Image (spheres, rainbow, N blue to C red):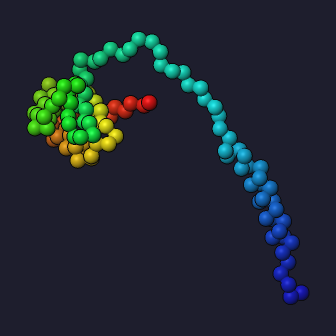
Amino acid sequence: MAEINTTSLVDVMLVLFVIFLVTAPLLTHKVPLDLPREQGAAEQPDPERHTLAIDAAGHYYWDDAPLPAAEIEPRLARLAGQNPERPLDLRIDEATDYRYISAVLAAAQRNGLTRLSFVVEVQ
């Protein structure tokens, strides 16, 4: 017999095709979740926690008060001198150049601040 027997190949391909047809809908199944919204009293501000905000133009704000760029390093040094474990929130606009962010992160690292968190507002 000079021909290749393709019957077994066709059988295997049909079995694989049936398995694919059965499992494909299971992979795209989504479980609907209805998560509860936060309700209740507004969170009280922590006097130990400070916020450093950077807007899209590269202006800095310490606890919502304008802060010159030259004052960032001394302010972070004072914060680290009081308590290096004190939390600092970074609130950064999505259009901010990374050079402003990296300057703050480098200053925080030089002064030994270890608890930085990025604050994101979800709309």
Give x and y (percent) for residue 1.
89, 87
Give x and y (percent) for residue 120.
37, 33
**Quick check: 36 above or below 12?**
above
Q: Looking at this rendering, what residue extends furthest in the top direction?
A: 41
With 20 as the anchor, is 114 left or right in this view?
left
Give x and y (percent) for residue 114.
24, 35
The residue lying at 71 percent from left, 44 percent from top is 26
**Quick check: 11 above or below 86?**
below
Q: Nearer the viewer, residue 19 or 47?
A: 47
Q: Nearer the viewer, residue 56 or 27?
A: 56
| Quarter of image, res 107 | top left
Q: Looking at this rendering, what residue extends furthest in the right direction?
A: 1
The residue lying at 29 percent from left, 33 percent from top is 91
Q: Looking at this rendering, what residue extends furthest in the front direction?
A: 57
| Quarter of image, res 87 | top left
The residue lying at 84 percent from left, 75 percent from top is 6
With 46 as the anchor, is 112 left or right in this view?
left
Give x and y (percent) for residue 115.
27, 32
Q: Nearer the viewer, residue 67 or 105?
A: 67
With 28 as the anchor, is 100 left or right in this view?
left
Q: Is residue 31 visible?
A: yes
